[in-house]
């Protein structure tokens, strides 16, 4: 990921610059970037809006948009869970420091 712009406590934009092995249509990433906006709603609440920019109305872009939309929804769900239930105990997730042994 490459950070593009930052407005502290308000907005960050970034772009994927390297796709993992097997990623479909990695050449399209050069045209796309993401914007994450934070809006203070008071009373310890924040609205987070994630936007994808640069997508075109063609099948490859539409597939990629769907892929990132689903991934962003999962990420936002996990972020909300973290603030509702508290931080993840990663050692417990892995079965302890020594893999549960």
Image (spheres, rainbow, N blue to C red):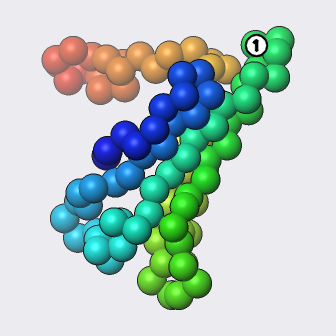
Percent position of residue 90, x then y: 35, 21
Q: Position of 15 compared to 68: left or right?
A: left
Most extreme residue toward the top is 43
Residue 6: tell me if it is visible.
yes
Rendered view: 15 above or below 38: below
Nearer to the camera, 87 or 91:
87
| Category of crowding for the residue at label 1, using alpha-carbon neighbours closer than 10 angstroms: few (below 14), some (14–19), many (at least 20) | few
Percent position of residue 50, x then y: 61, 47
Residue 63: tell me if it is visible.
no
Q: Residue at x 76, y 13 (%)?
A: 44
Nearer to the camera, 82 or 100:
82
Q: Position of 32 compared to 2: left or right?
A: right
Q: Position of 54 compared to 81: left or right?
A: left
Q: Residue at x 82, y 15 (%)?
A: 42
Q: Residue at x 53, y 72 (%)?
A: 55
Q: Residue at x 48, y 43 (%)?
A: 13
Quarter residue 7 falls in: top right
Q: Position of 100 compared to 32: left or right?
A: left
**How many numbered discs sit on the rendered protein?**
1
Percent position of residue 30, x then y: 33, 66
Percent position of residue 51, x then y: 61, 53
Q: Quadrant of the C terminus?
A: top left
Rendered view: 60 above or below 52: below
Q: Report the residue marked by disc 1.
A: 44
Per the image, label 1 sits on a secondary structure element best described as loop
Rendered view: 42 above or below 29: above
């Amino acid at each position: 990921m490459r950070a593009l712009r930052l407005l502290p406590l308000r907005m960050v934009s970034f772009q994927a610059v390297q796709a993992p092995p097997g990623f479909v249509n990695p050449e399209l990433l050069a045209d796309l970037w993401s914007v994450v906006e934070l809006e203070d709603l008071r009373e310890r609440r924040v609205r987070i809006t994630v936007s994808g920019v640069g997508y075109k109305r063609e099948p490859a872009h539409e597939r990629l948009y769907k892929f990132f939309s689903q991934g962003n929804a999962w990420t936002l769900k996990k972020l909300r869970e973290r603030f509702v239930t508290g931080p993840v105990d990663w050692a417990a997730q892995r079965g302890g420091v020594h893999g549960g042994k």
